[in-house]
Amino acid sequence: MLYDQIAMNKRRTGYVMFGFGVLVLAIGAALGDLFWANWESGILLAAVVTGVYMLIMISQSTNVIMSMNHAREITDENQAPELWHLVEDMAMVGQVPMPRVFIIEDASPNAFATGNNPEHAAVAVTTGILERLNREEMEGVIGHEISHVRNYDIRLQTIALALSAAIGLLVNFASNWLWWGGARRRDDRDSGGNAIGLVISIVLIILAPLAASIAQMALSRNREYLADASSVELTRNPQGLISALQKIDDSAPMKAADANSAALYISDPFKGKKNFADLFATHPPMADRIERLEKM
């Protein structure tokens, strides 16, 4: 059951990332058709913009994310010995380098991992999670975060963020150009076909940000399932993570969390209400996560 879940979630992540790439290219094609009557030019523009955004996002320092969430770094094991040794032990079991360790002053229990790769990763936990969870539960949580590092989820989230940002820039570019009348003039001899192409391009550009948000959130939810399963693989104790998730779910929203980082946390830090079919939820329903863990 455990390895089946891991394999299934990896396949689903591949599908989502493939869909993300297709969406970016489709937006580029729509731009090219709309403004230059040449979809190849639009695809090239989309590829260049996305590449630049990826380079910027991947090179972005972990310190920026930690600063946004008001986290302070623990640089010595004597500052928080139990937390330090838990992260150290789980990193050893997961066979990844010891990540940097941060603490967020917030009474709500939560945690997240970030970074570009296992060699430049960081784990942050709230003071609330240190106070409310016992060692067994903390092992499950830290195992979950180390799994994000081990599975390169941290890089996937960075890439997804870059793709979403690139789509937003392209759509904003298209909107401004349309507003100022920059769309190409259509050949009157083929007005019917051009009109259909124009409508398709405009609809695609309008719906692109929504589709990008859904894809990014689907990726985030899928990786949470995978990290839960991988945590059990490291700890061999699903009950520890089950109990931890129950306590995290039964808590007040965070105050220190940054909205742009919400998808990184082990649980929605703002305890947002679920929308229709959970399309816009950054995390899968806690009941579903616990049910999967119980089957392990």
Image (tube, helix red, strand yellow):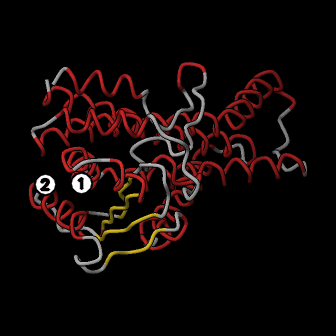
Residue at image location 46% in from the left, 71% down from the top: 60
**Label 1 Cα neighbours within 10 Å, binned few <14 / some 14-19 / many ≥20:** many
| Image-quadrant location for residue 287 | top left
| Residue 112, horizontal then vertical, whole percent | 38, 54
Residue 149 vs residue 160, the one in the foreground? 149
Is residue 155 something one can see in this rendering?
A: no
Q: Quadrant of the N terminus?
A: top left
Q: Amino acid at mark 1?
A: Ile
- Relative placement, left or right, of 56 versus 236 is right
| Image-quadrant location for residue 77 | bottom left
Image marks 1 and 2: residues in contact by CB distance under 8 Å: yes
Against 252, residue 89 (above or below) is: below
| Residue 97, horizontal then vertical, whole percent | 17, 67
Q: Amino acid at mark 2?
A: Gly
Residue at image location 43% in from the left, 41% down from the top: 267
Residue 271 vs residue 196, the one in the foreground? 271
Against 279, residue 227 (above or below) is: below
Q: Quadrant of the C terminus?
A: top left
**Label 2 Cα neighbours within 10 Å, binned few <14 / some 14-19 / many ≥20:** many
Q: Which residue is mark 2?
A: 94
Residue at image location 39% in from the left, 37% down from the top: 18
| Residue 295, horizontal then vertical, whole percent | 19, 20
Pointer 1 or 2: first along the chain: 2
Is residue 232 something one can see in this rendering?
A: yes
- Cα separation, mark 1 vs mark 2, equals 7 Å
Q: Which residue is mark 1?
A: 146
Residue at image location 85% in from the left, 50% down from the top: 182
